[in-house]
Image: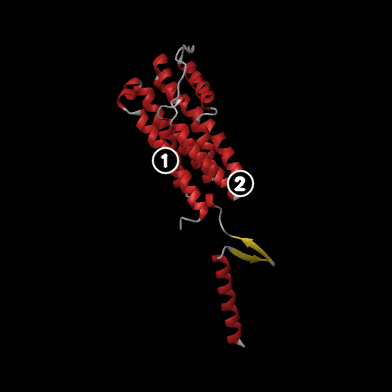
Amino acid sequence: MAHGARRKAASGETNGIDAFLSGRAECDGGIVSVAESPARRFSRMDALLTSCALVALAEMGDKTQLLAMLLATRFRKPVPIILGILVATLANHFLAALVGHSIAGVLTQPWFRYAVAASFIAMAAWTLIPDKIDEDAPLKAPSKAGVFLTTLVAFFLVEMGDKTQVATVALGAQFDNLLAVTAGTTLGMMIANVPAVLFGEALARKVSMRALQLAAALLFLLLGLWMIADLQGWIG
């Protein structure tokens, strides 16, 4: 009888392990899924580094980077300009990542994942389109506080609907990690814009913006194709 009990216990343990490995577990007569969604498989570092790299490259030659150069040329006060860009980006990209994060929590069906993949591929094409900004727009700020507020408002508004904001929404949906995506995209924006503020036109003359835009487009394309391959089960 003791041997039978041990066999039964061992059998129950084995069945429990098999159920877990198959992605299901029994609880109170019901079946509970323990499989994680695709977005949950990524670590915080994956989300942060990918977001940073994509946005840093996508920002090269973007209209917000052109705005940063314009502000630096007009005001010649780099510290309040950089702080204004930082605060504006944190606020804007937090909202964008929040939208993506919220959507990912509601829409977990495969078609939505395909839509996110398609958005990355579309971003690849969008990145290749050069941006322009009105250099004759009136920008006047007599003090450091005025420069900060002018930069904050201008940068936040120009970033609305921009490719880097749209990319942040898609990244928030893909990785489902709000803070890591916000931190990564903000870091990417600062990597691209701080040198633009400090060195301005000299940097633009020495760095091939077209080459950086092509690199960003390639990264967006590869990420979109990778997502499709993962959804199709072509990636182990």
Badge 1, how many Cα within 10 Å: few under 14, some, many 20+? many
Q: Quadrant of the N terminus?
A: bottom right
Which residue is under mark 1? 219
* Residue depth check, mark 1 versus mark 2: number of the one nearer the observer: 1
Pointer 2 local density, CA inside 10 Å: few below 14, some 14–19, many at least 20: few
Q: Which mark is residue 121?
A: none
- Amino acid at circle 1: Leu
Residue at image x 58%, y 50%?
110
Q: Residue at x 52, y 45 (%)?
A: 174
Chain-order first, disc 1 or disc 2: 2
| Amino acid at the residue labelled 2 | Gly
Q: Secondary structure at mark 2?
A: helix
Q: Can the viewer see residue 177 in this picture? A: no
Residue 38 seen in the current view:
yes
How far across and how far down the image is residue 107, in percent?
Answer: 62, 46
Task: Give residue 122's position: percent from left, percent from top.
Answer: 50, 37
Image height of 104 relative to 154, above or below: below
**Marks 1 and 2, Cα distance to the nearest angstrom?**
25 Å
Residue 223 horizontal/vertical position (percent): 45, 44
Which element carries disc 1, helix, strand or loop? helix
Judging depth in this view, the residue of 131 and 72 nearest the camera is: 131
- The answer to whether residue 230 is above or below residue 220 is below
Q: Position of residue 51 (x, y in %)?
A: 46, 40
Q: Is residue 223 left or right of residue 17?
A: left
Which residue lies at the image location 57% right of the left edge and 38% below the top edge? 98
Q: Which residue is mark 2?
A: 105
Quarter of the view holding residue 66: top left
Q: Viewer-proximal residue, 71 or 169?
A: 169
User: From the viewer's perspective, is 235 left or right of 202?
Assistant: right
